[in-house]
Every structure is written in structure tokens, then in C-alpha cells.
């Protein structure tokens, strides 16, 4: 019933055995984040093996598992809309203050907001003027309150199943290995300890029901030239597979550090950010455009220079523009260990090679668009000069806006859910694209 899917299975066994996962419950007892050698974590390989057993139970009892999944999705503290109210303040020749009483919220723990600003009282004092004024009031409450009746019905259905099915669901619901794995992207506070004043630890203690990868605690570390880098290098070579379900911990100089920029860029390209305290506009644009899709029309095989191709060109151009603004930041970024610069540059090249949209060049005499892959030389040069391409005709399209929480508290309430749109191919397979 994990809220998030990860893809660590492709990692070599040696990497999975070396990466230690820390559970959120273990953080409460800590006053300082321990080093890799001091931490009693769970090997990623063990986590995957235990998670596979839970998935096998879900497959064996698929009907009960679907019920439990529905409960899991509804029984959260994430706030959702649960009502609205409109107040019309009539115009007056002589401006005056008028009293209004809002309706009682229909659900427990509701929050009332007026034009995005929360209010604590249901009694309002609004000033009238020469023109009529309309005030929009919104109500929101936790999902568990909004859907309490549905949750009760699902639990009743679950209780009516066989004892064997109920026991299997209890095991799944209570198991730690049902919890997602989050990658923590953060700025190191010193060369010998990433969080010397436990400020990051205080934030991380807000995490609930999850495992985490925190480099100092999860990866073998070296602090002296004589230390063997083999184990650490083995892990770092596969960072592109580990940077998933990412929590970005903000700091004033986050975007001045090489590792941070790489992790931010990689997670923006994959759409795997569950929390972003930085909310840098360029990175926000990048992740939004990466997950914006031009529609696939029924005639897509007949007219390849169609409006949809031009819209895709517009999207690709926006992605390229964002990347061209980000890569100079990486060029100027600092590394505590200078040896890491070349390693991280190679990881970034792999991200760009896999994720950067192919160039689409219009062939006017053939009346179609030609797809051209980026060359290794172009990607190497991207760190020194602007990536360019022949965008051709472009058709404007509105970008999809991902709702990535800006605090760990909000992300935990949402159970680290990713809001990703369905691709056109997914929509097509579900019954055809509707423009």
C-alpha cells in the first residue's frame, strides 16, 4: 500500500547491501544524526525483500488489498475542499460596516479561508462601499473527517472478509516495510558533519511512516585521504537510481552547492519531489514543463506537423530554457571534496541524456518533424555554453502545475503523495484522448 513507487530494483546487490535506510520512528531517540558506522539502519536489500513479501500478500488477497488501499488513501490528515459560501456585500451611499455570520462547517476540524487567508471566527465585519462587493469563503478539512462515512463502510466490509484475509491485511497495515523510502537532499553544515547543530534533525522528526536515505547516515563515509573510497564510490555511481521521492531541505546557500543542484535537477526531471522547501522558480518551472503533455489526437499518424507537434515544441523549448538557466549554477557551484565535481558532472550528463527532450526539427519539404538526439559532445558542452536547437513552429500550451508541498509537515499529512498527470498514452489506453 505504499503511497509512492520507487525503482531501486535495478541497483546492483552490492549497492543495496551498503545503503542503510533509517525509519522515521528512530529519529525521536536521536539528539544528533549518527554516522554510517554508528547507525543501526536497515539495508536497502532487506527492505526490498520484506516489501516483496507484502506485495505477494496483496496479490494473493487482491480484493481485500483494494479495500485497504482505499482506506489508506482516505484516512489521512491532508486537507481537502469540503464546502464554499458566497457573501454579497450590497452597495451603500454611505460606507458602513456590516455583520455577517458564516454557516457552521459540515465537518470536524474544518478550516475557513477567505480569499486564501484563514480566519478563526465565523462572525465577519465587512465594509460596504459604493459598489457591490463579493467575498468568497472556502471550507476545508482533513480527508479522514470529510470521508469518515466512506472509511467506516470500507472498514465494515473489511471486517466481513475471512479471518485469513483480515490477518493478512493487519500484517500489511502494521508493517514498516509498507512505508515509502524518501531521499533527503540537504546542504552539509560542515566538512565533518552535515548537521552540527541538529537543525535538520529537528525538521526530519516531522516525518511519519517512512524510511529515509540521508547520505551521512546511509552511505559509507570518508574523511581522510587514507580512507578507502571503494564502498562510497560504488554507491555514488548509482545515485541516479537513489534520488527518488525527494525531500529538499532548504538553506540559504542550497543552490550554491554542487550536490544539491544535481539532486534538485534530477528530482525535478523525474517528478519525484514530495517536499520542496526551496521552491526555486526555475526548478519549479522545469518540473512543471517536464510533466506537461501535448495531446495525441486520433489523427496523430496522418498529420505529423500538426498542432500537437507544435505544442510539444513549445514544451521542449520551455524545458530547454530552464535547463540553460540551471546549468550555469552548477558550473559555479562549490564542492567540499573537489574530486566529486567530475563524478557529479557525469551523473548530470546521464540525467540529461535520459531525460532531456529530443530535438524536433521541422522538415518543410517533407512536411513533417524530424527527431534528432542530443550528441555526447553537445551534452558535454552544455556546462560551458547554452544548448540550442531549431525549435521551428511552436504552439502555446498551458503548463501543468505540480503541487509540491513546501514543508515536511504538509508532505507528511499528504503521506508523501506525488501529484503527477496521466500521459496521453495512458489516457489513450483508458479509452481514447479527449482534447
Image (spheres, rainbow, N blue to C red):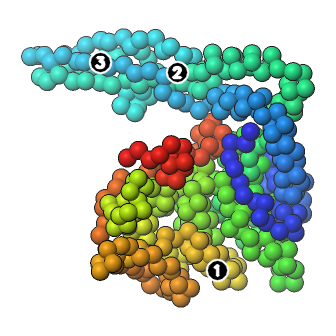
Residue 328: horizontal and vertical position, in percent? 48, 77
The residue depicted at 45 percent of the width and 59 percent of the height is 289
Q: Secondary structure at mark 3?
A: strand
Q: Earlier in the sequence, mark 3 or mark 2?
A: 3
Choose mark 2 or mark 1, whichever is in front: 1
How far apart are labels 3 and 2 at the CA level? 19 Å
Q: Earlier in the sequence, mark 1 or mark 3?
A: 3
Check disc 2: other Cα within 10 Å, few if <14, some if 14-19, many if 20+: many
- Most extreme residue toward the front is 302
Residue 110: horizontal and vertical position, in percent? 52, 21
Q: Residue beneath label 2, please? A: 110
The residue depicted at 66 percent of the width and 53 percent of the height is 245
Q: Which mark is residue 313?
A: none
Taking 102 as reference, is 336 above or below it? Answer: below
Closest to the observer, 62 or 348: 62
Closest to the observer, 186 or 275: 275
Q: Quadrant of the N terminus?
A: top right
Q: Which mark is residue 87?
A: 3
In the picture, measured across the screen, residue 73 lies left or right of residue 300, that is right
Whether pointer 1 and pointer 3 mark residues with C-beta atoms closer than 8 Å, the reply is no
The residue depicted at 40 percent of the width and 21 percent of the height is 84
Q: Secondary structure at mark 1?
A: helix
Q: Residue beneath label 1, please? A: 346
Amino acid at each position: 500500500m505504499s503511497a509512492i513507487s520507487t525503482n531501486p530494483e535495478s541497483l546492483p546487490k552490492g549497492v543495496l547491501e551498503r545503503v542503510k535506510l533509517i525509519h522515521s520512528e528512530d529519529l525521536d531517540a536521536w539528539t544528533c544524526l549518527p554516522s554510517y558506522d554508528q547507525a543501526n539502519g536497515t539495508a536497502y536489500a532487506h527492505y526490498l525483500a520484506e516489501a516483496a513479501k507484502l506485495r505477494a500478500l496483496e496479490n494473493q488477497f487482491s480484493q481485500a488489498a483494494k479495500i485497504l488501499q482505499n482506506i489508506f488513501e482516505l484516512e489521512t490528515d491532508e486537507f481537502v475542499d469540503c464546502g464554499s459560501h458566497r457573501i454579497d456585500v450590497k452597495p451603500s451611499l454611505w460606507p458602513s460596516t456590516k455583520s455577517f455570520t458564516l454557516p457552521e462547517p459540515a465537518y470536524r476540524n474544518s478550516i475557513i479561508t477567505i480569499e486564501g487567508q484563514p480566519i478563526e471566527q465565523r462572525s465577519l465585519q465587512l465594509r460596504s462601499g459604493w459598489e457591490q462587493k463579493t467575498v468568497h469563503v472556502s471550507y476545508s478539512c482533513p480527508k479522514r473527517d470529510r470521508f469518515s462515512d466512506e472509511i467506516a463502510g470500507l472498514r465494515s466490509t473489511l471486517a466481513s472478509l475471512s479471518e485469513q484475509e483480515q490477518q493478512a491485511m493487519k500484517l500489511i497495515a502494521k508493517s514498516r516495510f509498507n512505508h515509502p523510502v524518501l531521499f533527503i537532499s540537504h546542504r552539509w553544515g560542515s566538512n565533518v558533519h552535515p548537521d552540527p547543530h541538529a537543525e535538520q534533525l529537528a525538521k526530519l522528526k516531522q516525518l511519519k511512516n517512512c524510511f529515509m536515505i540521508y547520505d551521512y547516515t546511509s552511505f559509507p563515509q570518508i574523511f581522510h585521504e587514507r580512507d578507502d573510497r571503494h564502498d562510497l564510490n560504488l554507491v555514488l555511481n548509482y545515485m541516479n537510481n537513489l534520488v527518488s521521492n525527494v525531500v529538499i531541505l532548504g538553506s540559504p546557500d542550497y543552490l550554491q552547492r554542487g550536490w544539491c543542484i544535481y539532486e534538485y535537477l534530477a528530482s525535478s526531471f523525474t517528478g519525484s519531489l514530495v517536499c520542496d522547501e526551496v521552491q526555486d522558480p526555475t526548478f519549479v518551472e522545469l518540473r512543471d514543463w517536464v510533466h506537461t503533455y501535448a495531446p495525441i489526437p486520433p489523427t496523430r499518424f496522418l498529420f505529423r506537423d500538426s498542432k500537437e507537434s507544435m505544442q510539444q515544441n513549445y514544451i521542449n523549448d520551455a524545458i530547454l530554457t530552464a535547463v540553460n538557466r540551471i546549468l550555469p549554477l552548477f558550473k559555479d557551484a562549490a564542492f567540499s571534496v573537489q574530486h566529486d565535481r567530475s563524478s557529479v558532472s557525469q551523473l548530470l550528463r546521464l540525467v540529461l541524456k535520459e531525460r532531456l527532450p529530443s530535438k524536433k526539427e521541422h522538415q518543410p519539404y517533407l512536411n513533417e518533424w524530424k527527431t534528432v538526439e542530443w550528441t555526447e559532445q553537445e551534452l558535454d558542452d552544455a556546462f560551458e555554453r547554452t544548448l540550442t536547437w531549431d525549435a521551428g513552429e511552436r504552439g502555446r500550451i498551458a503548463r501543468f502545475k505540480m503541487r509540491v508541498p513546501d514543508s515536511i509537515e504538509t508532505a507528511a499529512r499528504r503521506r508523501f503523495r506525488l501529484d503527477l498527470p496521466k500521459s496521453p498514452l495512458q489516457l489513450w489506453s483508458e479509452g481514447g484522448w479527449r482534447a
